[in-house]
Image (tube, grey):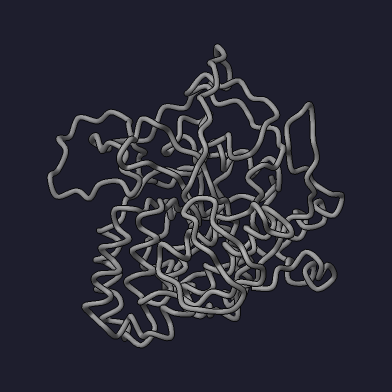
Amino acid sequence: MSVPAWRRERPGAGASGTRPSGVGWPGAAPVRSDQPPSGLGWPEPPRQGPPPVASRTGPAAAPPVRRRSWRRLTAVLMVVLVLMVGGGLLAGRALLHRYESAVGHDVLLDERARDLDSSVGWRNVAGPLNYLLIGSDLRAANPAAGQRSDTILIVQVNSALTQAHLISIPRDLRVEIPAFPITGYRGAKDKINAAFEYGGAGSGGVQLLSATLTDLTGIRFDGAAVIDFGGFVKVIDTLGGINMCVDAPITSIHTGRVFAVGCRDMTGAEALDFSRQRYGLPNGDYDRQRHQQQLVKAVLDKALASGVARNPIKLDLLIRGIGRSLTVDTGAASITELVLALRNIRPDGLVGIRVPSHITNIDGVSYVVLDDEAGGLFQAMRDGTVTAWAREHPHWVNSI
């Protein structure tokens, strides 16, 4: 795929650049006792060298058993943006180093989905930048029960690095999932969140999901992050809750909580419960996507308004709360460079986008399928012109 004109090539970037190895690949070095665990609770064997490149052929394996997922939302990477606000460059760097050491690092992007010409960092930045954010339903009490990607967000940061479009991918979107020989999956049409399971969950699941999205949209990613439910609840509670607005009354099918119309402060558990509801809402899963985007904005708004970067105790709690629940892949950039590069994004610079699509029934199964206008959105994502596309298609812009 050719590099768009808006992307400035970083000197020395390319396929030969070094990247961290993934979870589960063998190495000779002993495991360090001080090494932080992966944010998703995956096992942490020694990390040495890149994974072997598998051919795209192999015997078919039975797809994993699908299970209902309960966890929602992934945007903690947005929260990290506030660490530089009001803290000063020197203090901010020290805190970011602590944060970088606390979270799990892994290879989350398939090589086909990684933008090798990406340039991220406060010294040399070229936008737009694309990030894949995934909410996973890891069950800490029963890891063998499996995982699914509950929330899939593509975050595209504009060329000025001042605005981010939150593009929600419907989890029931019917797509072509490519083969993944590592698990024996041979590829088929299915709901997009099934790619996470067919890739073996964990880092392999994210890699297959990223490859599926690249095939679908034509974009490549500068990085990815995965968070589980528990970590996000801790983040919201550490911030003292967030303000969410309910525009239609709904009773949670999971907890029985009643959410009345109006704006009010919610705890982490309440906000996550609200954001995962779709039954009983006027637009079903599309309303849930909008609520998830609203939650992302509310977290960033509260983090900035509360001055968490100027409160060492609260900031330390936030960092430690995130660490064991978050796994990131920032490619050649460090988290410090990434945060510095994106430090000018504010809550009013977040725009929610709904992928043009509709719900239909195929052979007795409910799917989401793309509308014709989706092609224009994907073209705008490739060209870095989503702002102009959203202006011309306001009916696909969510009010968050």
Q: Residue at x 68, y 40 (%)?
A: 215
Q: Residue at x 21, y 77 (%)?
A: 313
Q: Residue at x 53, y 39 (%)?
A: 111
Figure quadrant of residue 107? top left
Q: Give left or right: position of 244 versus 121.
A: right
Figure quadrant of residue 259? bottom right
Total labels drawn: 0
Frontmost residue, 185 versus 356: 356
x and y percent of residue 266 in the render?
45, 72
Q: Give left or right: position of 211 versus 339.
A: right
The answer to whether residue 172 is above or below residue 128 is above
The answer to whether residue 64 is above or below residue 172 is above
The answer to whether residue 247 is above or below residue 91 is above
Q: Give left or right: position of 322 versus 112.
A: left
Frontmost residue, 316 versus 213: 316
x and y percent of residue 366 in the render?
73, 37
**In the orientation shown, which residue stands out farthest toward the left?**
33
x and y percent of residue 319 in the render?
29, 66
Frontmost residue, 261 versus 297: 261
Q: Residue at x 14, y 50 (%)?
A: 34
